[in-house]
Structure formats: C-alpha cells, structure tokens
C-alpha cells in the first residue's frame, strides 16, 4: 500500500491524537519553516512529525552538520519517516513530553528552533502546558517557535508563555491553516 493511503488510514484510526486526516501541503510546510534561520541553525526540534511532510521540508533546508530531533508517538508514521534514511535525523517514537529528557541525553542545552504540529486543541491541557514550558525553557534567545493549527484561537493555549506571536495563514491547505510564530526574547 502506498504511504499516502497508509497515512490517511492511520490518521483516521487515531483521530484524537492526530487531529486531522490530511497532512500539511507544501505551502503549509513552507510557512511552518520560513522563520527558521537555516544558515545558522545547528539543532532543530520537531514535535508531532506525522507522515514526515514537515520533517522532509526541514531536512531539505538544514545544514549538513545540523541535527533534527523529531517526536512522533505513532509507530506507523515513524516507520514512514525512517525510510528517509537521513543521518541528521534523530526520530523518537515517544511523546513530546520527553523532550527535555532527550535534549539532556544528547547533551543539548538550547535549541535554535522548535517546529510544533501537535494538535493542541485535541490534547489534554496539562500535557500541552508541560510541553510548551519545556519549549520555552530550551529555546535559545533569537530562536523561533512555530505552531500549526486550524483554529485562530489556538494561540490562547500558549500566549501566556510566548511573546509577540505573529499569526500567519494559508488557504493552500486542506483545511486552511494558521501558523503562529514567536521569536524567543
Ligand atoms: C496534526 S498532525 C501533524 C502531522 C504532520 N506534521 C503535518 O504537518 O501534517 C499531529 C501529529 O502529532 C502526533 N502526536 C500527537 N500527540 C503527540 C505527542 N504527545 N507526542 C508526539 N507526537 C504526538 C500525532 O500522532 C500526529 O502525527
């Protein structure tokens, strides 16, 4: 079975953790990563990698000596991403709640960017809060946090932690989507 069909079926089976049955279009992927300074970024984190559409977009732009740490709880999606066979990617088939544990294990204090596609609207508030606090703590000054959502009010989930959140939007996705971007002060 082709990976797009597999991903659709897997998403439909796990709608409460995936949050959608469609994956980000090229337009949305570009919007999610346009604020990342790929010329200088050495360590990037991705949360909620899904079928790897954003993962691929990041790897295409990332420096040869940079690392990407991606979290995805769904095993089937992880198997699809493993097919990329890129040594710069550390793919973790665990919850994003283990982010700090993994950064400590890899000896990384601060990261250059966090690209988050976790479905904050669907996940429990206490989980969201724990993950968002970790992002805030481990993102370096000048680094960017980007969050994907299909709802404009998702910003309410993290506006108490992140400053000057810029709201971007693309119609060229099913459904149309918002990308929230905040630079760490
Ligand atoms: C909205 S989909 C995004 C998929 C893909 N990145 C995209 O942009 O199309 C959200 C993804 O987050 C994953 N996810 C949900 N809860 C998670 C958690 N606690 N830790 C890691 N990944 C999680 C889901 O399995 C799903 O693949």
Image (spheres, helix red, strand yellow):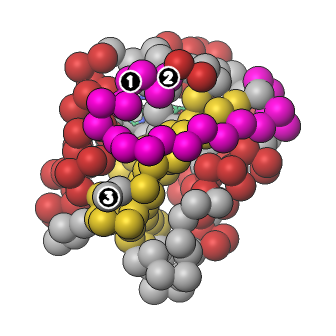
Residue 54 to residue 43: above or below: above
- Name the residue tied to disc 1: 157
Q: Residue at x 23, y 20 (%)?
A: 126
Q: Nearer the viewer, residue 139 or 166?
A: 166
- Point out which mark residue 100 bears: none
The magenta stretch spans which residues? 154-175
Q: Residue at x 24, y 56 (%)?
A: 138
Residue at the extreme right of the image, as rendered: 172
Left or right: 83 in relation to 25: left
Q: Quarter holding the N terminus?
A: top right
Is residue 17 rendered magenta in the image?
Answer: no
Is any atom of residue 74 visible in this view? no
Q: Nearer the viewer, residue 142 or 151?
A: 142
- Name the residue tied to disc 2: 154
- Point out which mark residue 185 bears: 3
Q: Residue at x 76, y 24 (%)?
A: 175
Q: Quarter holding the C terminus?
A: bottom left
Determine whether label 1 and label 2 are within 8 Å by CB: yes
Left or right: 114 in relation to 22: left
Q: Secondary structure at mark 2?
A: helix
Q: Residue at x 78, y 50 (%)?
A: 26
Residue at the extreme front of the image, as rendered: 164
Q: Secondary structure at mark 3?
A: loop
Measured Cα–Cα span from mark 1 to mark 3: 19 Å
Crowding at mark 2 (Cα within 10 Å: few <14, some 14-19, many 20+): some
- The nearer-to-camera label among 2 and 3 is 3
Left or right: 127 in relation to 76: left
- The nearer-to-camera label among 1 and 3 is 3
How far from the left and from the top, in percent, is residue 118? Answer: 47, 33
Asked if the beta carbon under badge 2 is closer than 8 A to the nearest atom of ligand 1, the reply is: no
How far from the left and from the top, in percent, is residue 65? Answer: 45, 86
Measured Cα–Cα span from mark 1 to mark 2: 6 Å
């Amino acid at each position: 079975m082709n990976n797009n069909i597999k991903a659709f079926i897997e998403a439909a089976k796990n709608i409460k953790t995936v949050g959608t049955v469609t994956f980000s279009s090229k337009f949305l992927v570009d919007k999610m990563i346009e604020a990342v300074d790929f010329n200088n970024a050495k360590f990037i984190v991705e949360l909620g990698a899904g079928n790897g559409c954003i993962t691929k977009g990041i790897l295409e732009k990332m420096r040869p000596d940079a690392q990407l740490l991606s979290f995805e709880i769904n095993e089937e999606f992880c198997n699809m991403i493993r097919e990329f066979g890129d040594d710069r990617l550390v793919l973790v088939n665990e919850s994003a709640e283990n982010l700090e544990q993994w950064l400590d294990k890899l000896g990384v204090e601060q990261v250059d960017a966090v690209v988050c596609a976790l479905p904050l609207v669907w996940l429990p508030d206490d989980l969201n809060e724990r993950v968002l606090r970790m992002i805030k703590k481990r993102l370096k000054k000048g680094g960017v946090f980007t969050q994907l959502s299909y709802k404009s009010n998702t910003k309410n989930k993290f506006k108490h932690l992140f400053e000057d959140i810029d709201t971007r939007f693309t119609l060229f996705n099913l459904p149309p989507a918002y990308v929230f971007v905040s630079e760490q002060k």
